[in-house]
Amino acid sequence: MSRVQSKNLFDFKPAGEIEPAVKAMEAEFGKMYSSPDGKRMQERIKELELKHDDESNKEYVSIIRAAMGSFVASMEGMEAYKYGPEQTITSSLNVPTTHYGEFDVPVEVYTPKDLVNDAKRLLTSMRTVEVLLP
Protein backbone atom coordinates (compact mmCIF):
# COMPACT_ATOMS: atom_id res chain seq x y z
CA MET A 1 0.00 0.00 0.00
CA SER A 2 1.36 3.42 -0.87
CA ARG A 3 1.81 6.05 1.78
CA VAL A 4 -0.64 8.97 1.90
CA GLN A 5 0.91 12.05 0.35
CA SER A 6 -0.57 15.28 1.65
CA LYS A 7 0.09 18.55 -0.10
CA ASN A 8 -0.95 20.68 2.86
CA LEU A 9 -0.29 18.66 5.99
CA PHE A 10 3.07 20.26 6.79
CA ASP A 11 2.54 23.49 4.88
CA PHE A 12 0.73 25.14 7.77
CA LYS A 13 1.18 28.89 8.00
CA PRO A 14 0.51 30.11 11.55
CA ALA A 15 -1.85 33.02 11.94
CA GLY A 16 -2.00 35.42 14.84
CA GLU A 17 0.77 36.36 17.20
CA ILE A 18 2.69 34.94 20.11
CA GLU A 19 1.29 35.91 23.49
CA PRO A 20 3.44 38.29 25.59
CA ALA A 21 3.62 35.72 28.44
CA VAL A 22 5.03 33.12 26.03
CA LYS A 23 7.56 35.63 24.66
CA ALA A 24 8.64 36.45 28.21
CA MET A 25 9.01 32.76 29.04
CA GLU A 26 11.12 32.17 25.92
CA ALA A 27 13.34 35.12 26.82
CA GLU A 28 13.78 33.79 30.36
CA PHE A 29 14.78 30.34 29.10
CA GLY A 30 17.13 31.94 26.58
CA LYS A 31 18.91 33.75 29.42
CA MET A 32 19.01 30.60 31.52
CA TYR A 33 20.53 28.47 28.74
CA SER A 34 23.06 31.12 27.77
CA SER A 35 24.27 31.59 31.37
CA PRO A 36 27.60 30.00 32.36
CA ASP A 37 25.78 27.33 34.40
CA GLY A 38 23.40 26.63 31.54
CA LYS A 39 26.24 26.26 29.07
CA ARG A 40 28.11 23.91 31.43
CA MET A 41 25.00 21.79 31.82
CA GLN A 42 24.53 21.60 28.04
CA GLU A 43 28.16 20.58 27.53
CA ARG A 44 27.90 17.91 30.20
CA ILE A 45 24.74 16.53 28.59
CA LYS A 46 26.55 16.32 25.23
CA GLU A 47 29.42 14.43 26.87
CA LEU A 48 27.08 12.01 28.62
CA GLU A 49 25.12 11.35 25.42
CA LEU A 50 28.26 9.80 23.92
CA LYS A 51 28.83 7.44 26.85
CA HIS A 52 26.93 4.21 27.37
CA ASP A 53 27.77 3.01 30.86
CA ASP A 54 25.38 2.81 33.81
CA GLU A 55 26.95 5.63 35.79
CA SER A 56 26.84 8.06 32.83
CA ASN A 57 23.26 7.09 32.06
CA LYS A 58 22.22 7.71 35.66
CA GLU A 59 23.91 11.13 35.69
CA TYR A 60 22.28 12.02 32.35
CA VAL A 61 18.83 11.08 33.62
CA SER A 62 19.44 13.00 36.84
CA ILE A 63 20.37 16.18 34.95
CA ILE A 64 17.42 15.90 32.56
CA ARG A 65 14.96 15.28 35.40
CA ALA A 66 16.25 18.29 37.33
CA ALA A 67 16.02 20.48 34.23
CA MET A 68 12.51 19.30 33.40
CA GLY A 69 11.39 19.73 37.00
CA SER A 70 12.40 23.39 37.06
CA PHE A 71 11.00 23.89 33.54
CA VAL A 72 7.58 22.51 34.46
CA ALA A 73 7.55 24.38 37.79
CA SER A 74 8.19 27.66 35.99
CA MET A 75 5.11 27.12 33.81
CA GLU A 76 2.67 26.30 36.62
CA GLY A 77 1.51 29.85 37.17
CA MET A 78 1.31 30.88 33.52
CA GLU A 79 -2.15 31.79 32.31
CA ALA A 80 -1.53 30.33 28.85
CA TYR A 81 -1.18 26.85 30.35
CA LYS A 82 -4.26 27.23 32.54
CA TYR A 83 -6.42 28.28 29.59
CA GLY A 84 -6.04 25.10 27.51
CA PRO A 85 -7.54 22.60 29.95
CA GLU A 86 -10.43 24.97 30.64
CA GLN A 87 -11.30 24.99 26.93
CA THR A 88 -10.88 21.24 26.35
CA ILE A 89 -12.83 18.08 27.04
CA THR A 90 -10.54 15.13 27.79
CA SER A 91 -11.57 11.56 27.15
CA SER A 92 -9.68 8.34 26.56
CA LEU A 93 -9.90 5.09 24.67
CA ASN A 94 -7.86 1.91 24.37
CA VAL A 95 -6.50 0.83 21.00
CA PRO A 96 -5.70 -2.88 20.71
CA THR A 97 -2.36 -3.79 19.17
CA THR A 98 -0.50 -7.00 18.41
CA HIS A 99 2.80 -5.80 16.92
CA TYR A 100 4.77 -6.30 20.19
CA GLY A 101 2.41 -8.74 21.86
CA GLU A 102 -1.28 -8.36 22.53
CA PHE A 103 -2.19 -5.38 24.67
CA ASP A 104 -4.16 -2.14 24.59
CA VAL A 105 -2.51 1.22 24.11
CA PRO A 106 -4.24 3.96 26.13
CA VAL A 107 -4.92 7.08 24.04
CA GLU A 108 -6.06 10.40 25.44
CA VAL A 109 -8.36 12.46 23.23
CA TYR A 110 -8.52 16.23 23.64
CA THR A 111 -11.54 17.88 22.05
CA PRO A 112 -11.86 21.68 22.01
CA LYS A 113 -15.17 22.62 23.61
CA ASP A 114 -16.04 24.82 20.65
CA LEU A 115 -16.10 21.71 18.39
CA VAL A 116 -18.47 19.67 20.55
CA ASN A 117 -21.69 21.07 19.04
CA ASP A 118 -20.27 21.54 15.55
CA ALA A 119 -20.48 18.04 14.03
CA LYS A 120 -19.02 19.03 10.65
CA ARG A 121 -15.85 20.53 12.14
CA LEU A 122 -15.54 17.70 14.67
CA LEU A 123 -15.77 15.02 11.96
CA THR A 124 -13.23 16.91 9.83
CA SER A 125 -10.76 16.97 12.72
CA MET A 126 -11.37 13.25 13.35
CA ARG A 127 -10.70 12.42 9.68
CA THR A 128 -7.43 14.32 9.91
CA VAL A 129 -6.37 12.06 12.79
CA GLU A 130 -7.32 8.97 10.75
CA VAL A 131 -5.07 10.13 7.90
CA LEU A 132 -2.16 10.68 10.29
CA LEU A 133 -2.47 7.24 11.88
CA PRO A 134 -0.76 4.37 10.01
Image: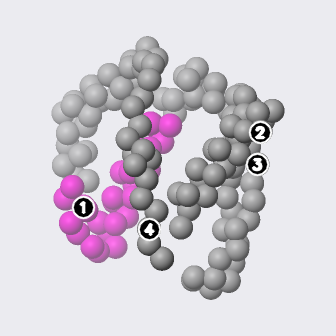
Left or right for 105, reference 28: right
Q: Would you say residue 73 sits in the magenta stretch?
A: no
Q: CA distance from mark 4 to mark 3?
A: 29 Å
Do callouts 1 and 4 mark residues in contact (Cβ within 8 Å)?
no
The residue drawn where x is 81% and y is 32% is 117
**Residue under numbered circle 2:** 119
Do callouts 1 and 2 mark residues in contact (Cβ within 8 Å)?
no
| Amino acid residing under circle 4 | Arg
Q: Measured from the top left, where is residue 67 in percent x and y?
A: 39, 43
Sooner in the amino-acid sequence: mark 4 or mark 3: 4
On screen, residue 43 above or below 27? below
Q: Quadrant of residue 114?
A: top right
**Residue under numbered circle 1:** 48
Q: Measured from the top left, where is residue 69 in percent x and y?
A: 48, 42
Give 60 or 81, whichever is nearer the viewer.
81
Q: Main secondary structure of the magenta part?
A: helix
Question: Is residue 23 in view from this perspective?
Answer: yes
| Amino acid residing under circle 1 | Leu
Q: CA distance from mark 2 to mark 4?
A: 28 Å
Sooner in the amino-acid sequence: mark 3 or mark 1: 1
* Image depth: mark 2 or mark 3 in front: 2
Sooner in the amino-acid sequence: mark 2 or mark 3: 3
Q: Secondary structure at mark 3?
A: strand
Q: Residues within 10 Å of mark 4 (few under 14, many from 20)?
A: few
Q: CA distance from mark 1 to mark 2?
A: 50 Å
Magenta highlight range: 46-72
**Residue under numbered circle 3:** 91
Q: Measured from the top left, where is residue 132 in percent x and y?
A: 53, 57
Q: CA distance from mark 3 to mark 1?
A: 39 Å
Q: CA distance from mark 1 to mark 4?
A: 37 Å
Left or right for 107, reference 47: right
